[in-house]
Image (cartoon, rainbow, N blue to C red):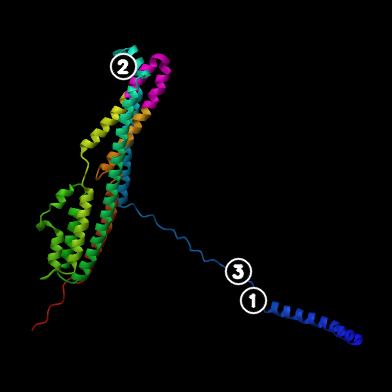
Amino acid sequence: ARCASSHTAAEQAKNMPRRRLALALLLQAAAAFRPPPTRLKLALPRRHATAIAPPSDADKLARDRLIKTSVVLLVPSLAVGAISLVAFPALCRGMRSAFGVATLAVLSGDQGQFIQNFLSVIGILFSLLIGNTYAFCYNQQVMVYMALFEEVSVAKALLEQATLVCQGRPSYAGVLDDVQRYVDRDLKRADLSPAVLLSTRPRDDPLEAIMWQTSVGTPGAIYDTVRWLRRARGERLGAMQRKLPPLHFALLFLLGILEVCAFPLLSAGAATTVGAGALRVEAAMFALMTAALTLTLGVVVQLWRPRGSAYSVDAALAVMVEGLEDELSARRAAIRSSPADLPPAPKV
């Protein structure tokens, strides 16, 4: 047994170098057949120099509205602030000479809290009214935008359907003219009252003319699109109608004036004890407060206006109408470049 085990160990010792040699040869063969490493090349898109397109009429209109609104808001606010800064000391001195030092001292002490209650009531009324007014006007602008996007989308669908139905017929040019008349006399007229546009007589209605030209006997497939467009038009006119009268904003300005009237009265009484240095500081704070109130009221008034400000839909409407008019011009050009009439009917 010892001889057999020693003989087996000797054979294993002889076979170990052979196995290592075979394993080394296999590793070299695998390394020889391994493909060379490749470098990944990312094909990045090249940036081509593009010419800057000139600003369109819609871009110019948006820029003009922004500049005009900034001037309308900032100039009155700065003017009111400057006037308040200059007039505040003179107003306090005038109250001091008119009411007397003793009366102003009692009012500035406000031991009965009458001035404090007055400011609290006026401030609450002003905050409630101007906050609700801002929310109402903002929601109205959102409704106008939504109605305009829907109406322009339906108008484009009507134009596409009219092209499919009337292309190659003599009435095709008349249908395109009616769509253009609808855009010019109705969709673009944000300066007219919505009630006036809604009361247009049927014989002046281009949508009815489109239905007459595309329907024979019974209403055609365009009738549903025209009805959809009328519904979208009604929603747009209802959203653009002013709901708040000018008297509402007059009350807002009146509450704002009442809010700031108590401050000169209090400062005139306090200036008798603390001196003129505090009066100058109070004048600066009073000027900032009046300028901020004027700016806030101006923003609400600009939201209320249906057109002519950066908050109105003029710029967005100009962009949408510009795309619709370009499509109408392209279809008119296609009519001029191709025969517009059907071939004549064969003679019987």
Inspect the image, locate mark 3, and give the three-letter code of the amino acid beneath it.
Arg
The residue where tag 3 is placed is 39
Question: For this rendering, which residue is in front, 306 or 107?
Answer: 107
The residue where tag 2 is placed is 95
Q: Residue at x 79, y 82 (%)?
A: 19
- Which corner quadrant of the image does residue 247 belong to? top left
How many angstroms separate mark 3 from mark 1 (CA)? Answer: 12 Å
The residue where tag 1 is placed is 35
Q: Position of residue 147 (x, y in %)?
A: 26, 54
Question: For this rendering, which residue is in front, 326 or 205?
Answer: 205
How many angstroms separate mark 3 from mark 2 (CA)? Answer: 87 Å
In magenta stretch: residue 275: yes
Inspect the image, locate mark 2, and give the three-letter code of the amino acid beneath it.
Met
Q: Position of residue 345 (x, y in %)?
A: 12, 79
Q: How many marks?
A: 3
Whether residue 279 sits left or right of residue 43 in the image: it is left
On residue 49, which mark appears? none
> Is any part of residue 68 visible from this angle?
no
- Which corner quadrant of the image does residue 82 belong to? top left
Q: Position of residue 233 (x, y in %)?
A: 20, 55
Q: Nearer the viewer, mark 1 or mark 2?
A: 2
| Mark 1 and mark 2 residues within 8 Å of each other at the beta carbon | no
As displayed, is residue 181 above or below residue 214?
Answer: above
Magenta part, dominant SS: helix
Q: Residue at x 41, y 23 (%)?
A: 281
Q: Residue at x 48, y 62 (%)?
A: 46
Q: Residue at x 17, y 67 (%)?
A: 172
Task: Return the disc, 1 or 2, that comes first in the chain's sequence.
Answer: 1
Residues in magenta?
A: 262-286
Q: Residues within 10 Å of mark 2 (few under 14, many from 20)?
A: some
